[in-house]
């Protein structure tokens, strides 16, 4: 019986490919730093210096600075989605899943401040992106609406409300380090659930259910 090619181990990238991957990752991380600082006008030379790579290496991966910055935002969205997937526990209740994702994301504003700043700078892209929180939230919102748990007619408008709340919360937590991020996030989550038609008692319970610890997150890649 012939071996299944899908089951055969794939060869590891050779040294040149690994070096290219490291260079691209360094450029993306440097771009994320500039985005987080709001420095979108930095010249390419300054970005390559921050990444500790040569100018020529930039053009091996990106044609323009805008392309790099878009890759940096996409990478941040993917990282956000990976965190949710790592910490999320399977649940048959889409309302519980939606609430958990919202509450974890709110806490990430303090746990991962650079990721938070990149997401805040990307602004409305967070709402309509096919990466990160948006596709997961839309999925859970639609499931909750279809099951009758959420009394909402338009899941996209519900997503606008939820994402707007998260963006506003993130900015508040960055500007007000004295605020309790967990308490603020849970209060907004509870208010959103009630807005979407969940009873006050159920909303309060869901917004205060124990969460996985963000302390267990792996450190950023070097």
Image (spheres, rainbow, N blue to C red):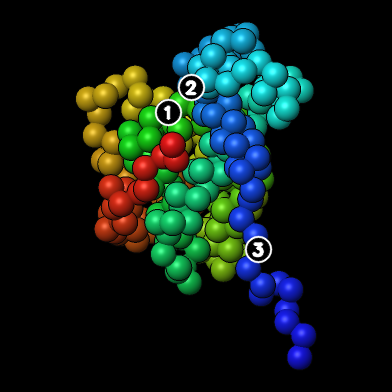
Image side of residue 95 versus residue 131, left or right = left
In depth, the one of 201 and 5 nearer the eye is 5
Q: Which residue is mark 2?
A: 33
Is the residue 48 above or below the residue 152 in the image?
A: above
Residue lying farthest bottom?
1
Query: Dot 2, crowdedness within 10 Å: few (<14), some or many (≥20)?
Result: some
Badge 3 element: loop
How many angstroms separate mark 2 from mark 1 (CA)?
7 Å
User: Where residue 147 appears, x then y in whole percent?
Assistant: 56, 68
Image side of residue 202 versus residue 27, left or right = left
Q: Which mark is residue 10?
A: 3
Q: Are marks 3 and 2 in contact (CB under 8 Å)?
A: no
First in sequence, mark 2 or 1: give its number: 2
Query: Dot 1, crowdedness within 10 Å: few (<14), some or many (≥20)?
Result: some
User: Where residue 5 appears, x then y in whole percent?
Assistant: 74, 73
Q: Are marks 2 and 1 in contact (CB under 8 Å)?
A: yes
Q: Which residue is mark 1?
A: 114
Q: Are marks 3 and 1 in contact (CB under 8 Å)?
A: no
Task: Quadrant for residue 17, please give it.
Answer: top right
First in sequence, mark 3 or 2: give its number: 3
Task: Quadrant for residue 53, please give it.
Answer: top right
How many angstroms separate mark 3 from mark 1 (CA)?
34 Å
How many angstroms separate mark 3 from mark 2 (CA)?
33 Å
Q: Please indicate, yes or no, whether residue 184 appears anywhere in the rendered image.
A: no
Residue at 32%, 48% in the rendered image: 214
User: Where residue 112 appears, x then y in whole percent?
Assistant: 38, 35
Q: Please indicate, yes or no, whether residue 167 appears anywhere in the rendered image.
A: yes
Badge 2 element: helix
């Amino acid at each position: 019986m012939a071996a299944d090619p899908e089951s055969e181990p794939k060869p590891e990238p050779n040294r040149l490919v690994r070096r290219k991957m490291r260079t691209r990752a360094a450029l993306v991380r440097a771009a994320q730093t500039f985005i987080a600082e709001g420095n979108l006008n930095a010249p390419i030379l300054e970005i390559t210096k921050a990444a500790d790579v040569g100018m020529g290496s930039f053009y091996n991966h990106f044609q323009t600075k805008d392309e790099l910055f878009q890759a940096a935002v996409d990478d941040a969205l993917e990282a956000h989605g990976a965190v949710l997937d790592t910490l999320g526990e399977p649940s048959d209740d889409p309302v519980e899943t939606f609430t958990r994702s919202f509450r974890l994301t709110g806490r990430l504003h303090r746990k991962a401040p650079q990721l938070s700043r990149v997401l805040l700078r990307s602004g409305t892209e967070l709402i309509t992106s096919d990466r990160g929180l948006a596709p997961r939230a839309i999925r859970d919102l639609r499931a909750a609406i279809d099951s009758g748990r959420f009394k909402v007619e338009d899941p996209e408008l519900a997503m606008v409300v939820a994402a707007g709340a998260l963006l506003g919360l993130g900015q508040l937590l960055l500007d007000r380090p004295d605020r309790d991020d967990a308490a603020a996030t849970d209060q907004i989550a509870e208010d959103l659930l009630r807005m979407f038609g969940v009873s006050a008692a159920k909303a309060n319970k869901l917004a205060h259910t124990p969460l996985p610890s963000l302390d267990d997150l792996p450190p950023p890649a070097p």
